[in-house]
């Protein structure tokens, strides 16, 4: 049984050490839009803009945020240049991407809700949020269901899954919950995804490995270089020689996959926390990077 807890309004977070006055919610807008499109819009009963506005109002009512950093993917994503097959499955669904881009390109829809959408040219929303986590030393709750984001989780940074689980609850992940879910601590999540692969981003991973072997190997080592060294010598326990040899042989590809799964922290995001202040009267459009 997972020990994850429901994200509650400020007044109900009795066991939390987070300070509501400085708590920043970092929202993965692309992830939210993609989920809402498939969950609420494909039937044609509502538009993506309407579904997003409804969700955001629900979110604001539930947690009463004072500061929100809402990021869309920027144009000219550097990962596409690094790996031509990156997110190739999504490229096959251009209509979905066009609808999400329309949300990004019409900031007035968001501004009317008091939140300014942000983008950074060349960077994904994930990188932008990672950069915020790096530059802002206050408490942060990442709003995303993306497992990539779990590498950012710490005692200071939590991750809130906006998609309700089977019991209708939204889960809040700290370091222990991430390890319970994925089998590895947050700081090794990018290694796990690189080795096992990530179908959502069309990253194949090491041939024949998968999650079970990847978790097993990671738990036996303190770093990826140590893991590769042991694999090259056939020293990983409970993993057959064939798969260890494959890992060693594909180490160059693995290096590329790790580059893709690692979130960058050098996106040019605003460093002033007040940039992200929720303001229902906001009419400015000069905070788009």
Image: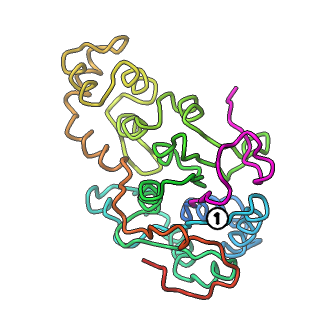
Give percent across and percent down for residue 283: 61, 88
Relative vertical location of residue 252 with respect to residue 75 in this rendering, above or below: above
Residue at 19% in and 39% down:
252
**Is 160 situated left or right of 237 in this image?**
right
Secondary structure mostly seen in magenta is: loop
Residue at 42% in and 77% down:
289
Q: Which residue is at the front of the view, 255 or 197?
A: 255
Relative vertical location of residue 35 with respect to residue 205 in this rendering, above or below: below
**Is 70 situated left or right of 198 in this image?**
right
Give the residue number, with chain letter if any, for mark 1. 37
Tell me if residue 18 is in the magenta stretch.
yes
Mark 1 crowd level (few <14, some 14–19, many ≥20, 10 Å Cα): many
Give percent across and percent down for residue 15: 73, 39
Relative vertical location of residue 154 with respect to residue 274 in this rendering, above or below: above
Give percent across and percent down for residue 219: 41, 21
Magenta segment boundaries in residue numbering: 1-26
Residue at 79% in and 45% down:
168
Q: Which residue is at the front of the view, 155 or 165?
A: 155
Q: Quadrant of residue 281?
A: bottom right
Give percent across and percent down for residue 250: 22, 34
Residue at 45% in and 45% down:
199
Relative vertical location of residue 265 with respect to residue 195 in this rendering, above or below: below
Q: Quadrant of residue 102?
A: bottom right
**Total marks placed:** 1
**Is 207 situated left or right of 39 in this image?**
left
Q: Which residue is at the front of the view, 98 or 267?
A: 267
């Amino acid at each position: 049984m997972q020990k994850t807890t429901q994200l509650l309004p400020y007044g109900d977070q009795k066991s939390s050490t987070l300070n509501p006055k400085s708590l920043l919610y970092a929202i993965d807008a692309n992830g939210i839009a993609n989920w809402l499109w498939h969950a609420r819009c494909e039937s044609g009963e509502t538009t993506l803009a309407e579904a997003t506005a409804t969700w955001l109002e629900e979110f604001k009512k539930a947690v009463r945020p004072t500061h929100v950093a809402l990021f869309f993917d920027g144009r000219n994503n550097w990962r596409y240049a690094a790996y031509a097959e990156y997110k190739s499955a999504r490229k096959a669904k251009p209509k979905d991407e066009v609808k999400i881009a329309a949300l990004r390109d019409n900031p007035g829809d968001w501004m009317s809700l008091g939140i300014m959408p942000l983008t950074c040219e060349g960077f994904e929303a994930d990188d932008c949020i990672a950069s915020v986590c790096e530059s802002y030393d206050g408490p942060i709750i990442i709003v995303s269901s993306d497992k990539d984001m779990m590498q950012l989780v710490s005692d200071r940074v939590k991750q809130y899954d906006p998609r309700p689980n089977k019991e209708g609850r939204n889960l809040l992940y700290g370091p222990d919950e991430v390890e319970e879910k994925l089998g590895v601590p947050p700081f090794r999540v990018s290694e796990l995804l690189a080795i096992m692969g990530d179908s959502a981003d069309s990253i194949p991973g090491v041939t024949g490995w998968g999650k079970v072997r990847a978790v097993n190997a990671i738990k036996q080592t303190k770093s990826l270089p140590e893991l590769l060294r042991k694999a090259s010598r056939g020293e990983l326990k409970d993993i057959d020689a064939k798969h260890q040899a494959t890992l060693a042989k594909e180490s160059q590809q693995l290096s590329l996959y790790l580059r893709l799964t690692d979130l960058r922290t050098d996106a040019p995001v605003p460093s002033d926390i007040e940039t992200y202040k929720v303001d229902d009267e906001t009419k400015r459009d000069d905070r788009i990077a």
